[in-house]
Image (cartoon, rainbow, N blue to C red):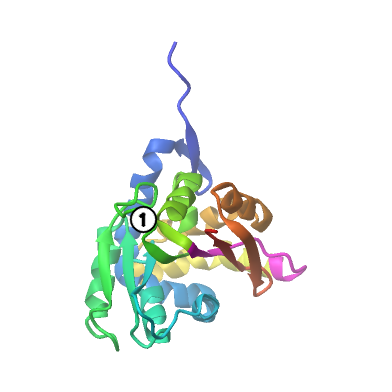
């Protein structure tokens, strides 16, 4: 008798664990060129404030005796990398890594026009099996990407592995609204407007239906904080943004 097949969620659907990555890849291949525009439309531009807050919390140094190395995972379009490099006045070296080649293509093209060109490299990689050596990076950032990883626990352990002792993990992710009244408005907006807006802008609303559903499947902040701690991180905290529409999670490799 064969072993039962391991499954996970793909939005509201249950799929074979081994199939999820391919399904996620298809979503982002389809929306890469207008991904950041859709983030603006879906959040009213507020995602920019959340990302700014994330980089401010990271507080990358502006000078030092050795390179300050950051791995920005699932950061294909370079949105976070650009902020980190600018905040460090060009001192930080950021490796932008993504499993999706189209997202990386968009980011690499944009990086040519950045204030500090040449400070970012773009590497196609799987968050669950990083091609980087142990104890290499000073910081690991991931914004709105961890919920798309099939094996989140494995990705967190990989983050811990590649960080230096004293290195920091920062995860920005959508969360679960906990303000009475706002939750109903947010759910109505998510269900009724985001997929149609996605179809209008990109020609396909299905990827955005998945994105809405994936947010609801993601663990609540306390549960995700425990996953970070279970991966070996210390001093794990999280902060709610905008009524807990999003949350910023932090942990240290000590």
Q: Examine the structure image and report whether residue 176 is included in the region drawn in magenta.
A: yes
* Above or below for 85 versus 179: below
Which percent across, then down, holds residue 178? 73, 65
* Above or below for 163 versus 120: above
Classify mark 1: helix, strand or loop.
Answer: helix
Seen from the viewer's position, the closer of residues 235 and 146 is 235
The number of callouts visible is 1
Q: Residue furthest front?
A: 65
Q: Examine the structure image and report whether residue 160 is included in the region drawn in magenta.
A: no
In the image, taking residue 87 as reference, residue 130 lies left or right, namely left
Residue at the spot of label 1? 27
Q: Which residues are magenta?
A: 166-183
Which percent across, then down, holds residue 195? 47, 63
Which percent across, then down, holds residue 70? 38, 69
Say whether residue 219 is visible: no
Quadrant where the image shows the N terminus:
top left
In the image, taking residue 231 as reference, residue 35 lies left or right, namely left
Quadrant where the image shows the C terminus:
bottom right
Which percent across, then down, holds residue 27? 36, 55
Residue at horizontal 50 percent and vertical 39 percent from the top:
8
Seen from the viewer's position, the closer of residues 77 and 73 is 73
Seen from the viewer's position, the closer of residues 153 and 67 is 67
Residue at horizontal 55 percent and vertical 77 percent from the top:
57
Residue at horizontal 29 percent and vertical 59 percent from the top:
29
Seen from the viewer's position, the closer of residues 122 and 5 is 122
């Amino acid at each position: 008798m064969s072993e039962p097949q391991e499954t996970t969620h793909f939005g509201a659907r249950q799929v074979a664990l081994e199939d999820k990555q391919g399904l996620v890849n298809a979503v982002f291949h389809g929306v890469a060129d207008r991904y950041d525009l859709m983030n603006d439309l879906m959040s009213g531009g507020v995602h920019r404030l959340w990302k700014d807050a994330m980089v401010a919390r990271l507080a990358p140094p502006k000078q030092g005796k050795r390179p300050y190395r950051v791995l920005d995972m699932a950061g294909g379009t370079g949105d976070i990398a650009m902020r980190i490099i600018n905040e460090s006045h060009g001192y930080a070296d950021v490796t932008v890594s993504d499993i999706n080649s189209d997202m990386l293509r968009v980011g690499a093209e944009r990086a040519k026009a950045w204030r500090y060109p040449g400070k970012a490299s773009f590497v196609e990689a799987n968050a669950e099996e990083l091609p980087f050596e142990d104890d290499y990076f000073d910081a690991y950032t991931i914004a709105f990407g961890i919920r798309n990883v099939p094996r989140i626990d494995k990705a967190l352990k990989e983050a811990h592995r590649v960080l230096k002792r004293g290195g920091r993990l920062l995860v920005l992710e959508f969360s679960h609204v906990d303000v009475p009244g706002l939750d109903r408005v947010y759910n109505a907006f998510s269900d009724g407007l985001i997929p149609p807006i996605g179809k209008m802008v990109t020609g396909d609303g299905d990827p955005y239906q998945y994105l809405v559903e994936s947010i609801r499947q993601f663990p609540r902040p306390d549960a995700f904080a425990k996953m970070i701690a279970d991966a070996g991180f210390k001093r794990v905290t999280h902060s709610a943004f905008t009524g807990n529409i999003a949350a910023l999670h932090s942990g240290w490799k000590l």
